[in-house]
Amino acid sequence: QVQLVESGGGLVQAGGSLRLSCAASGRTFSRLAMAWFRQSPGKEREFVAAISWSGGTTAYADSVKGRFTISRDNAKNMVYLQMNSLKFEDTAVYYCAADAKVSFGGRHYSAYDYWGQGTQVTVSS
């Protein structure tokens, strides 16, 4: 089993920045493909960013490319999402996800085995 705990969400003005963190435990972190997803009320869960075991491969949704950066620290069992130039439409609950089967999990939520509880990000316009 893998436990994932997100933190760092909050209220921020449009144009501001936030850094989300996800702490993982329960398995060898360096063998977990990680990702961030988000979900707004009435919408499906949406891919945000993904990162491979080593951090050498990343992927981003078009809507966040150039503004968000995913990274990981395998020594600390942490994955991060740096969010800059936030927009009102970035408002959502952000979830950390882990895939224990492959080195890079990709963009679809069904690929991921483990999920955190989520952290709320609210961007005021």
Image (spheres, rainbow, N blue to C red):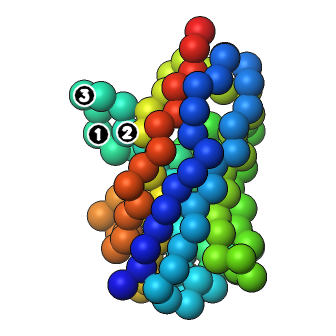
Tell me where residue 94 appears, x and y as whole percent: 47, 45
Helix, strand, or loop for circle 2? strand
Q: What residue does disc 2 label?
A: 39
Examine the image and state in which quarter residue 123 appears. Answer: top right
Q: In the rendering, which numbered label is found on residue 90?
A: none
Side of 13 relative to 91 (left or right):
right
**CA distance separating discs 2 and 3:** 8 Å
Which residue is rendered at x = 30% and y = 64% of the image?
Answer: 110
Q: Looking at the image, do the residues carrying marks 1 and 2 touch, with CB atoms under 8 Å apart? A: yes
Distance from the alpha carbon under mark 1 to that under mark 3: 7 Å
> In the image, which disc is placed on residue 44?
1
Within 10 angstroms of label 1, few (less than 14), some, or many (20 or more) residues? few
Q: Residue at x 59, y 9 (%)?
A: 125
**SS of the residue at dot 1?**
loop
**Residue 56 appearing in the image:** yes
Q: Residues under labels 1 and 2: Cα distance?
A: 6 Å
User: Looking at the picture, which amino acid does disc 1 mark?
Assistant: Glu
Residue 103 locus on image (x, y percent)? 55, 82
The circle on residue 42 is 3
Q: Would residue 28 be found to the left or right of residue 101 on screen? A: right
Q: Position of residue 15 (x, y in %)?
A: 73, 19
SS under mark 3: loop
Which amino acid type corresponds to the residue marked 3 in the rendered image?
Answer: Gly
